Image (cartoon, coloured by chain):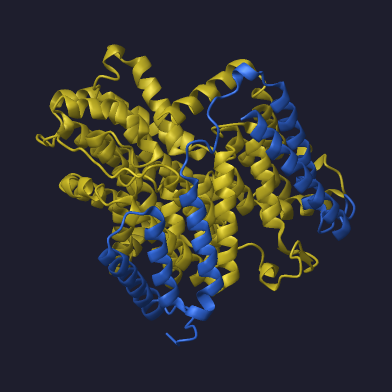
Amino acid sequence: MRAYDRASSIFWFFFSMIVFVQSFRMGVGTLSNPGMGFMACCASGVMAFLSLILLKQSFAKRKEQEEIARPFAGLLLGRVVGVVVAVILYIIFLASLGYLIGTFLLMAALLVIVGRYRWWLLILFPALSSLVSYYVFAKLFQCPFPAGMFSF
Amino acid sequence: MGFFHNFLMGFGVACTPANLFFCFVGVVAGTLVGVLPGIGPTAAIALLLPVTFAVTPTSSIIMLAGILYGAMYGGSTTSILVNIPGESASIVTCIDGYQMARKGRAGPALAIAAWGSFIAGTLSVVFLMLIAEPLAKIALRFSFPEYFSLMVAGLMTVTYMARFSIVKALMMATLGILIGNVGLDMISGLPRFTFGINELSDGVGVIPLIMGVFGLCEVLENLEKELSTRVTYKTKLRNLWPTVKDWADSKWAIIRGTLIGFLIGILPGGSGTITTFLSYTMEKKLSKHPEEFGRGAIEGVAGPESANNASCGGGLVPLMSLGIPPNATMALLFAALVIHGISPGPTFIAEHPDIFWGLIASMYVGNVMLLVLNLPMIGIWVQVLKIPYHLLFPLIVLFCVIGTFSVAGSIFDLKLMLIFGVLGYLMRKFRYEGAPLILAYVLGPLMEQALRQSLLLSGGSFTIFFTRPISAVTLGIALFLLLSTIFPKIRKRRDTLAELEEEE
C-alpha cells in the first residue's frame, strides 16, 4: 500500500493546490468579511497539509510492515472496465437512441460482460427490465425519459 | 400541545393507508437489502430516494427509515442460517448465530434475534421520543458559532471512527466540503468552480453523488470478484420460540445492547456495525461462561442484534433535533427532507410535528410489521439469497441510472454519477472511505454559512468559537479526538476493530 499511498497523496496535493489557487482568484475576502473563496481556500489548505502527512507516513512505514496484497491484484478488472464503458456508451447514445432501446442495449451489454447468459435470457431480461421500468417511471411517475430518433 | 397529544397525532399520521403502505414497502425493501449481500442499507436508501419524490415528505421519510431498520432485521437471517452477513452490522451475529444453527438451534437464534431487534427498536424509539424534543428546545439557543463547532466535532468524530487511516478520512471530509462548494455562492450569488457549465450552477446534486459513491461503486467492487451464487442451506427450522432459559440468558444482553446501540448511535460516526462489536465484546466480558462465545452462546446473538437496531433510533436524535446527520445513512435521510423543501434542525419538530411524530409512530408500527414478516417468512428470505448476482447487478445499475436521471431529466447528472462511481471505486481500492465525504458534502454549505456568519459577528476574530461555552466544549472534544489518535493504546484499539471488520 506504500506506493499507492504515495501516488494518491501526490495526486491530492496537486489537486488541493489547484483549488487553493482558484479560491484565491475568486476572492477570499478578509476575516471580518469572508469572500466566496474563503471556505474553499481553508479546506484545500487543510487537504494539502494532510496529503503531505500521508506522503510522510508512506515513507515512514517500514517495508516489513507493508501488506503483501495489492489493491488491484488478482481481480477481474475487465468486468469493471466493461461496466464503465457500457455506461459511458449509454450516456452518449441515450438521447439519440431513446430510453427503451438504450436501456435494452445497456442491460444486454451488462449480461454479456459477466458472461453468464443464454440467448433467450439475453433478450427476455433486457426487454422486461426496460419495459417495466419505462412503464413505472415514465407512465406512472411521469419521468421525462428521452424518446430518441424513433420517438419511443 | 402535550406529549400524549403529539404521540396520538403521530399514530393518526402513521396509520393512514398511504403511510402504512410506504412503511410496509420500506420494511420489506429493508429486509430484502439486509438479506442480500452486496448491497447495504445506505446504497438501498440512495437507490430508492428518487421513488419518494412523488410522495409526501412524511411518507418519504417513513419509507426510507423503514429500509434502514428493516435491513438490521434482515441481516440476521442469513448470518444465522448460512453464515453470510447480508450487511456489515450483522457480521458479529454470524459468530454465534451460525454455531447455534449448526447445533440445531437455528429457531431460537432467529427468534431471539427478531425479538431482540423488536425490543431494542421499540425502546430506542421511546428514547428518541423523550430526548429529541427537549434537545431541540435547547438547540434553539444555539447561534452560528455553536453550530459551526458542533459540525466540526461531528465531522471529527466520523473521521475518528473511520475504519482505516484517519488522515485519509480527514482528506475525504475536506473533499466533501470542496464538492459542496460548487455552485452559486450563497451571499454574492456568483458561480464557484462551475467551469462555465450551466448545470453546475445549482451545485453537484446529492443524488448523482450518492448513486455514484454508494450504488455504482458497490456494483463495480462486487464484479471484480468471482460471482458465487451457491447457497447451502440445510438447517431444519424448529422451535421458533426461545425457551425460558434462552430468555433468561438473553434478557440483560438485550437491555445492554439497546443502551449501547442507542448511545453510540447518537454519536457522529456511530454506525450499527461498531455497536455490534462493542455489544459482543461487552457480553463476552460480562459472561459467566465466556468460553461458550464462538460456540453458540445466545447472548452473542441477542446483544449485537439489539444494538444494531437501537442505533437506528439513536442516529435520528441529532438529525431531528440539531439538523446534524451523524453518519452517511442519516445524511441521506437529511437529503430526502431537504429535497422536499424541509430543513431538519432545532425548529423542525415544532414546525413539522406531523413528520416527526408520524415517523416515531411509524417506527413502532414498522417494528411490529418486521416481527410478523421475519419469523414466519424466514424460508422465503433464504430463497431470496438464490437470486444470482449476474441478474441482480444490471438491475442495480438500472436503478442508479433511473434514479439519477429522474431528478432533473439531465444527462449531465448521469455523467456526474459515473464520475463519482469510478471515484468511489478508486477510493475503496486506495482505502479512502466514502462516509466522511458524503457527510462533509451535506454539512459543507451549512458549515460555510455558520463560519462566515460567525466571523461577521465577531469582526473577524476566531475567539468567538472559544469564548462561548458550548462552542468551546464541542471544539475541545473535537481537538481531543484528533489528538487522542496519537496515543498508541487508542490507535491500537482502532486498528484491531478495523482488522476484525476486514477479516469478516
Instruction: Decide: is A112 above or below B377.
Output: below
Relative image position of residue B401 (x, y in whole percent): 47, 65
Q: Which residue occupies 35% across, 30% down?
A: B92
Relative image position of residue B131 (x, y in whole percent): 47, 43
Q: Which residue occupies 28% across, 29% down?
A: B301
The image quarter containing residue B356 is: bottom left
Residues B86 and A73: in front is A73
Q: Colour of chain A?
A: blue
Residues A4 and B296: in front is A4
Q: Which residue occupies 24% across, 52% down?
A: B369
Q: How many marks?
A: 0
Chain shown in yellow = B
Instruction: Decide: is B498 above or below B442.
Output: above
Instruction: Decide: is B49 above or below B217.
Output: below
Q: Is residue B475 left or right of residue B207?
A: right
Residues B178 and B3: in front is B178
Instruction: Decide: is B372 above or below B1.
Output: above
Specify whether residue B2 is in view: no
Specify whether residue B462 is in view: yes
The quadrant of the picture occupied by the C terminus of chain B is: top left
